[in-house]
Amino acid sequence: MVSKKCKYAIKAILYIARNQAEDRSIFTSEIAEKERIPQKFLESILRELCNQRILISKRGRYGGYRLLRKPEEISFTEVMRIMDGPIALMPCVSLNYYTPCDECKQEEDCVIRAVFLRVRDATLDIFNGATIDKLK
């Protein structure tokens, strides 16, 4: 399940992508109001997205947030991993957070794992294809 934090992060990135102009950054308060996201929670999310080089922030009167990269370079997969960690439903099929199952003797013979590998691959195909530019 996708967390509220992840959902809010995607909504915030989409809002910024739709509304930033060459001479305009977007304030946290504007995103919070328009997207109905609690402002304190949003501030934490935006800081994390800056730390992960999705956004850039500028302080002051003309400050706010902007995309650091082009919208077509930001996928749901990346944002989901930043906010929620693994996308795979089982740790033994995760690409970035792999952990073997304790009860499994031969991973390559596990029929359960084989199904979840297919689920992971299909899910990643969809999320990798869902970039910010395609949704804004």
Image: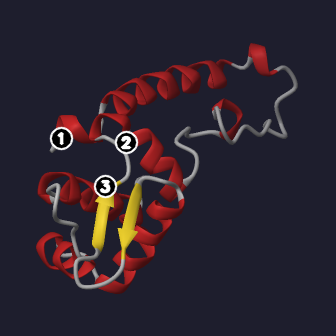
Residue tagged by mark 1? Answer: 135
Q: Residues within 10 Å of mark 1 (few under 14, many from 20)?
A: few
Identified by mark 3, the residue type is: Ile
Q: Which residue is identified by label 2?
A: 76
As shown in the figure, which amino acid type bears the numbered disc 1? Leu
| Disc with the residue nearer the chain's start (1 vs 3) | 3
- With 109 as the anchor, is 115 left or right in this view? left
Rendering quarter of residue 61 = bottom left
- Residue at the image point whose x is 29% and y is 60% from the top: 66
**Residue at mark 3:** 10
Task: Find out whether the residues at labels 3 and 2 contact each other: C-beta distance under 8 Å.
Answer: yes
Q: Residue furthest right?
A: 105
Work out whether residue 103 or residue 13 is closer to the camera in this orientation and state it: 13
**Counting residues from the N terminus, which is met first, the one under dot 3 or under dot 2?**
3
79 horizontally vs 71: left or right: right
Q: How is the image coloured?
A: secondary structure
N-term-proximal mark, 2 vs 1? 2
The quadrant of the picture occupied by the C terminus is top left
Label 2 residue SS: helix
Q: Is residue 45 above or below residue 77?
A: below
Question: Where is 70 relative to 44, above or below?
Answer: above
**Mark 2 neighbour density, 10 Å: few (under 14) some (14–19) many (20 or more):** some
> Could you tell me how far apart the alpha carbons at marks 3 and 2 are, in whole angstroms?
8 Å
Q: Amino acid under label 2?
A: Phe
Q: Percent x, y for residue 126?
A: 34, 28
